[in-house]
Image: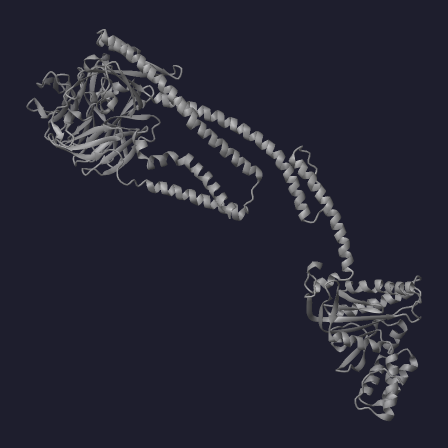
Amino acid sequence: MAKKILSYLLILFVTAAAAWSVFGGYIIQVLNPDAVSRRQSLGAVCLDPRGNVYCLQNTGGRLLLIGVDDTGQRFLEKALFEEDEQERLAMDLYAAETGSLLVASAAVDPLTERICSIAMDAFYENGTHAGRLFELACDQSAEQALSGGVRFSSVSEAGGEILFGLFTGGAAGRRVIELYTAAEGSFETARKVAEYQDNGYTGFLALDSRTAIAASPGRLSLLSADNAREIAVDDRLLPGRFWRQGDGGTVFQDMASGDLYLADPVNMTAYPCARGETVVYEESGLRLRQFDLVSVNPSLRIVGVIRTPMGGDLYTGGSSYMDYTGSAEQRGFNLQIFWVAAIILGVLLVTTFLWDVYVDFLKMRVSIVFKQTITIILSMAAMTGLLIQLVFAQSLEQTLTWHYRERLFAAAQTAEAAIRAGQGQALWDELEKGSVLHEGGGSAEIPLRYDLLREANGSWRVELSSAHGMEGVLLQHLPLRDKQAAIAVSVPEVAALAEGGVVYVDTYEQLGPQFYLFARLPEGRLLSVSSSAVGMQRTIDLFLRDIALVLSVGGAVMLLVLLVVQWFVVRGLRRLKRGVDAVSAGNYAVHTEICSGDEVEDLSRAFNTMTGIIRRQVASLAGVNKTVLRFVPENLLRLIGAHSLEEIDKTAFVKADMTTLLVRFAFPDGAPQTADALFSAINRVIERIAPLVSANGGTVYDFRHDGFHAVFSGEPADAVRCAIQIREAQSALNAALDITGRVDIRAAIVSGEVLLGIIGDEQRMSPTAVSDAMDTARRMMELCWDSSLYIICTGQVFERIEGYRSRFVGLVDLGDHRERLFDLYDGDPYSLLKHKQSYAKVYRRAVDAFYQQRYEPARALFMQILQASLEDGVSRNYMYWADRYCTQGCSDPVYRIFEG
């Protein structure tokens, strides 16, 4: 039982380890969502006309579309662009009135932060991809895809069409905005319908296929095919995103103050509809300008996002009051726990199946090579995993982290020195040209981002930045600084930073893991230098992959060497096993030759010594058995149901219908006078005739000086055949030259119930038979000598044989019953056989007359037979009795010896 339990636990461990190697990441994601949440970042948000919130969230390199209803319940989570080889950077998200979703994204390399293409895709409201409306190849930085480069404008709807603009380069190097439209619901490729001159616009929104509204710092323009009209706005405005309203108006956000403005293209006016300083959530004192992401639906309902390390908190409402809607992270009961339960159940089922095969089919026996191979593989896998996870991975991560921080610190020192020297924007231009970290021996260039921040009214604003055109905006509006504002506001180490001090912070953003260095400067300013940590993770992954490869190759070589060694060991063991199998099969002559020079060779020598001893013991035992079987016949063991001599005791017996053969012999010329001659003569006779009993299926169980008793468990014909062969053997004995004196052998055959068993004491036992048939045979034998009968049998035996020359002897009075006797004279001397055969009919008439009490005719017939041969003892006895009965009479005649 202990072995079964231990084997089950071992198989469970191996199966669980294999399952963990395949599903470990998924299980951690489900059971420890916080570990996954730390690798999340919201990239875009929108509010559909029904009040549902949709978000684009980067989770560990996967772009997820998340839907949250107005009660805070998540109703959608769908991975987008899973078929794409490159990661996607979320640029914008729009919910159409028909329920479809439009996603603006870019194919990005997170390591170099370079964009190779941008695309506009349509999705059904369940997150299924509907079609790609537009795609353009380009080569630019990720920052340019969000500000200043080839990028999409805000999306709008008008007249059953989807409209969006594309900031790009036109003919002769001009910067233009191309307007594209696509029919709602058809999801066909968008077509270009107009083109506008780009005069440094930061925002653009198509009102219809002919007119659009565009914005630049301090400017708001209404564009048409033939002219551009200015809408009067404050020249301090920094317009950002636009949202189309149901009444034809347009809402845009001032990135400097967080205010929302409503532009009326009909009246050519723009005025604030929501102030950034407005406290929209009283419980936490949250102001509108503090939102990291904002979106407005056509009914002027607002959704705001506060980015958190776990994703983001969502707020929805109007311009003066908003409710906490929920979080973009997974909340409540996670249904994926059922998949984890299914994995665990599968592990248990596979374990049980393998254990059942091991216990029932393999009988808990497997090759030692297999056991040691599994042990070595598991040990090497465990050692490799522990070395990689606990030694190499942590050491390399610490080393690379220190290296990254040193480079960020050096870059920050250079920037700080230049700022103190008052070089201003010229410094930033120079820094941008040289702000590259080389990764992997110069194979990849990782850009550095510099931001000089100043705190005002509880918010951080950008004073200088490597992202051009962003001076004066709120920190959260800087492209690709997803969590920089949250860190600057909420991280205690940054808030408590003294002048001249630095703080390192690592976080996860849209482009993957990021390193930030914050340095406190005079006048309440804060210098931020950041770079992507994707390269570090890739370096770690590549290094660990190489380490794993080296360890795997080394382990494979070690395994091969160990298997070769084990093969030689097992080869010797297999030879020993074949020897043991041969011994168990009864072949004790097996000999093993193993020259391994180790314990296996010693075991082989011990085995050969053991087999030699066994051979000698077996030979001795065979002699003993042969000797014992002289006294206890092997056929006797079979008859009483014993398999060996050890099973023979006084309780062993068998009761069955058998045929008894009584054999008696005599020496007519007189027995030898000396003991040696007497025993020699007796043994020669018995040695010649006793094997004939075994040859015919009989068993001799009682030897006497003048014969033996035998039983036959088969048909009576076996005993008759044996008796005739004994008579034939008598002729051969008498004809042999080395036999002194003739022998005369007689046989009596009787069938009946025989009790065959063992009698004696504990020191000596002997087989015997107890049966009335034995007594009958002995009385029958008394008739043979004076009746010239050589083989006689009872009527019961005679009725079950055929094909033998025979005659009816008569009725014999055996004391308690009478028995019919028959003379089987096939074994008689030749002259007597011919006589009995010649006078068979006369003999039959004579016997019939005798038993019919016609004694005179019977006497005459018997005299006729005796005149031919006086050797016919049966006829002689009948004649004498018939002669007496002629004068005295007899009413109940039987056959008996006439004694005068």
Q: Is residue 276 left or right of residue 527?
A: left
Q: What is the count of numbered marks? A: 0
Where residue 468 sits in the image (x, y, percent)? 22, 14
Horizontally, is 599 left or right of 882 in the view? left
Residue 123's spot in the image, x, y percent?
25, 33
Which residue lies at the image location 83% right of the left edge and 77% below the top edge?
Answer: 782
Where residue 531 sits: x, y (%)?
30, 18
Identify which residue, 253 or 390, lies in the foreground.
390
Residue 183 seen in render: no
Q: Which of 409/119 is in front?
A: 409
Q: Position of residue 540 (x, y in %)?
A: 40, 23
Question: Splitting the image into 4 quarters, where does residue 443 fall?
Answer: top left
Vertical position of residue 359 compared to residue 453: above or below? below
Quadrant in which the C terminus is drawn: bottom right
The answer to whether 451 is drawn above or below residue 183 in the figure is above
Coloring scheme used: one colour
Residue 202 sits in quarter = top left
Rendered image quadrant of residue 701: bottom right
Q: Residue at x 40, y 44 (%)?
A: 345
Q: Residue furthest left?
A: 267
Q: Residue at x 87, y 63 (%)?
A: 684
Looking at this view, is 810 or 180 the one in front? 810
Residue 510 visible in the shown view: yes
